[in-house]
Amino acid sequence: MGRGQDARATAGQRPALQGHAAMMDPDRQSDASEGAALDSETVGKFVAKFEENFGGREGLRCARAPGRVNLIGEHTDYSGGFVMPMAVDREVRLFFRPAPGGPVRLWSENYGEWDEFDLDDIQRNDSASGAWPNYVRGVALMLQETGCELCPIEGIIHGDVPIGAGLSSSAAVEVAAAKAFCAAANCEPDMRELALLCQRAENEFVGVNCGIMDQFVSIHASAECALLLDCRSLEHELLPLDTSAFRVVVCNTMVHHELAGSAYNERRAQCEDAARRLNERIGGVEQLRDVSPDVLADNADVLDEVTLKRARHVVGENARTLQAAEALKAGDHAQFGRLMDESHESLRRDYEVSCEELDLMVELARRQPGVLGARLVGAGFGGCTVNLVRRQHADGVVRSVKAAYREETGIEPEIYQFVAVGGARVGTC
């Protein structure tokens, strides 16, 4: 028989997160709203395009929302656990102004197409070349359902978040659209509720069963910070990530294996089954988030071999994520990197969501000077790795890993360097 109530006392693994607390010095906190630099040439280009399509620039504003990468805490969100994303210096921008009395009318610069709809009759648009209209439409519908009296807008939407790289370009579209609609209508929901609203738009209108992490960090991020998020309570804490000393390097393997979708559903079901069985044994287990590594080890006999491996990853990953938060607070970046490495090994061995290309990309990065940690990021079975790299080595790491991966696979990877930026905002043009 395993441990009972006394053992479960530590199982929640719940730190004292604070809603908007930032573990930063005052100077860094003053820069917390900074995002990706938007040069005057880019602004001028889109202002000119707006004037050409809509006539004049009076009332023109720009809503901006960043993409994100998750540093550690993978496949923990749907078990009520902890994640640690940061907003990256790539974003979606919506140049807009109110258009009272008219339809919502938007041009996508990335897809080269228009979308137009009435706020009093919002339906899905499945004829577009991408899903982008439905992210916008879904957000408008959810805002109206909360009681916001929206005003139609007209504008141009553009993003430089790589599409299909697992950097949450879709959440950035949702958040930028939500900020634009709210600004045009002078309606500003609570930021926590706005994140939930955007998630709901993707779940219910677009039809993608995403978690809350992407929208939440796009709204709540701060410059030079990672964000520790409790996916159950939505309590969060900002943690220092000194971008003068480090770069976050994301390496895209450029492969996506068919297994990813079915494997995700299977593992989610296995986690729910593990929580149910453990709850029958010891009680108080709603999700695997409620289980500590010691409790899992003491009650491993209630799980079959495969389910135990899945649970061991989730429980261990929650513990690693909290340890990583303590490492950042202490400035121990070497320890943070070691935890990233452990995360990958757990994802590879226990959760079994890696693949040959991801393992190769991780190994190539680990051979490079200045790389503190490397792991797969996202659902797995292809996609990207995330690496913490000392700034002075970052350019060399990009060159070396790109060349070595191309030589090994014949595939030209995409590799991005990121710094941590602030969350979504609206400004004048």
Image (tube, rainbow, N blue to C red):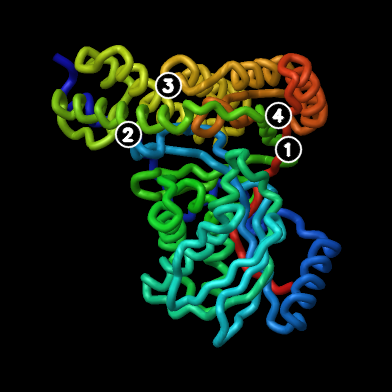
Instruction: Mark 2 or mark 4: name the one nearer the start of the chain.
Output: 2
Name the residue rendered at 46%, 14% in the picture: 349
> Nearer the viewer's eye, disc 1 or disc 2?
1
Instruction: Mark 4 or mark 3: name the one nearer the start of the chain.
Output: 3
Residue 231, disc: none
> Nearer the viewer's eye, disc 1 or disc 3?
3
Residue 285's image quarter?
A: top left
Q: Quadrant of the C terminus?
A: bottom right
Name the residue rendered at 37%, 33% in the picture: 265
Q: Between marks 1 and 3, how big is the CA–CA gap?
A: 27 Å
Q: Which residue is mark 2?
A: 289
In this view of the protein, can residue 343 be seen by the observer? yes
Secondary element at image label 1: strand
Instruction: Mark 4 or mark 1: name the one nearer the start of the chain.
Output: 4
Q: Between marks 4 and 3, how big is the CA–CA gap?
A: 25 Å
Instruction: Mark 1 or mark 2: name the one nearer the start of the chain.
Output: 2
Instruction: Mark 2 or mark 3: name the one nearer the start of the chain.
Output: 2
Q: Which residue is mark 4?
A: 389
Horizontal and vertical percent position of residue 59: 69, 82
Residue 351, disc: 3
Tag 4: residue type?
Answer: Val
Left or right: residue 43 versus residue 235 is: right
> Nearer the viewer's eye, disc 4 or disc 1?
1
Residue 277's image quarter?
A: top left
Tag 1: residue type?
Answer: Gln
> Nearer the viewer's eye, disc 4 or disc 3?
3
Tag 2: residue type?
Answer: Arg
Horizontal and vertical percent position of residue 213: 47, 46
Q: Which residue is mark 1?
A: 417
Answer yes or no: do the residues labelled 4 and 3 have beta carbons within 8 Å? Answer: no
> Nearer the viewer's eye, disc 2 or disc 3?
3
